[in-house]
Amino acid sequence: MPGTGGWRPDESALARTRRARRVDRALAVRYPDARCELDFTDPFTLLVATVLSAQTTDVRVNATTPALFARYPTPAELAAADPDELEEILRPLGFFRSKARAVTGLSQALVERHAGQVPARLADLVALPGVGRKTANVVLGNAFGIPGITTDTHVLRLSARLGYTASDDPLVVERELGALLPRADWTMACHRLIFHGRRTCHARRPACGACPVASLCPSAGIGETDPVRAAALVKG
């Protein structure tokens, strides 16, 4: 939508850093329960769930993965899954044939390269089929406690609106957003941005009048500014 970029070239790097950290503190108050919204029990289940979440919702993935992991609880079992049976389990997610091939290939690689264990290194994760930096950072941050910047659609949109970056390249956004925040806060800061993007700072009609960081946002006013009408737009 027009007006989604909040980059201000006259803002100093120090001022931008201070503002980003104030925004993160305010979002921490607004969303104390911010977390990964994919259900998982270990690195493997999170890795597969994250791959399956492409082009669908976390809610739908969470409704599908219990049956998936009950039938195929380990990489070795998923690697050897019957394609027709696996596709039927994944059918509710859409693109179920390609997703079945993706998680099968991923599981085979885990068995062949890592003895069935999910590696805890970015370089090893992104070398797996179907795993990019976004997925790798989700797994590192949430399954291993290794901080990472997750450049999903909400983080990209809010980083632009908040004027953290002038780029829409995920790798650039990852680097520039990471430079604004303490490394220890990267994972949770991304959770808070995702929560804010899903609940308040919507893609088409952000609820600016109900936003806890409107005073810190250079894009404030591009959405609904009336407090009552904005509050009605807030989800969750």
Image (cartoon, rainbow, N blue to C red):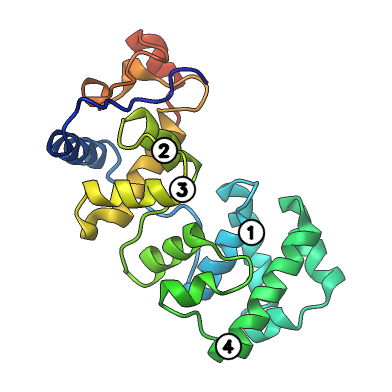
Label 2 sits on a secondary structure element that is: loop
> In this picture, is 178 found above or below 223?
below
Q: Amino acid at mark 1?
A: Leu
Q: Position of residue 10 (x, y in %)?
A: 20, 25
Disc with the residue nearer the chain's start (4 vs 2): 4
Task: From the viewer's side, name the closer residue of 169 and 125.
Answer: 169
Q: CA distance from mark 2 to mark 3?
A: 8 Å
Q: Which residue is mark 2?
A: 167
Q: Amino acid at mark 2?
A: Ser
In this view, the mark in front (4 or 2): 2
Q: Which residue is mark 3?
A: 170
Disc with the residue nearer the chain's start (1 vs 3): 1
Q: CA distance from mark 4 to mark 2?
A: 35 Å
In this view, the mark in front (1 or 2): 2
Q: Position of residue 99 (x, y in %)?
A: 72, 61
Contact, mark 3 vs mark 4 (Cβ under 8 Å): no
Q: CA distance from mark 1 to mark 2?
A: 27 Å
Quadrant of the rendered image containing residue 69: bottom right
Task: From the viewer's side, name the closer residue of 2 and 172.
Answer: 172
Q: Return the mark for residue 113.
A: 4
Q: CA distance from mark 3 to mark 4?
A: 28 Å
Please, which residue is most extreme toward the front here?
Answer: 9
Q: Amino acid at mark 3?
A: Pro
Q: Is residue 74 left or right of residue 87?
A: left
Task: From the viewer's side, name the closer residue of 220 and 163.
Answer: 163
Q: Dot 1: few (<14), some (14–19), or many (≥20) neighbours within 10 Å? A: many
Q: Position of residue 87 (x, y in %)?
A: 81, 64
Label 1 sits on a secondary structure element that is: helix
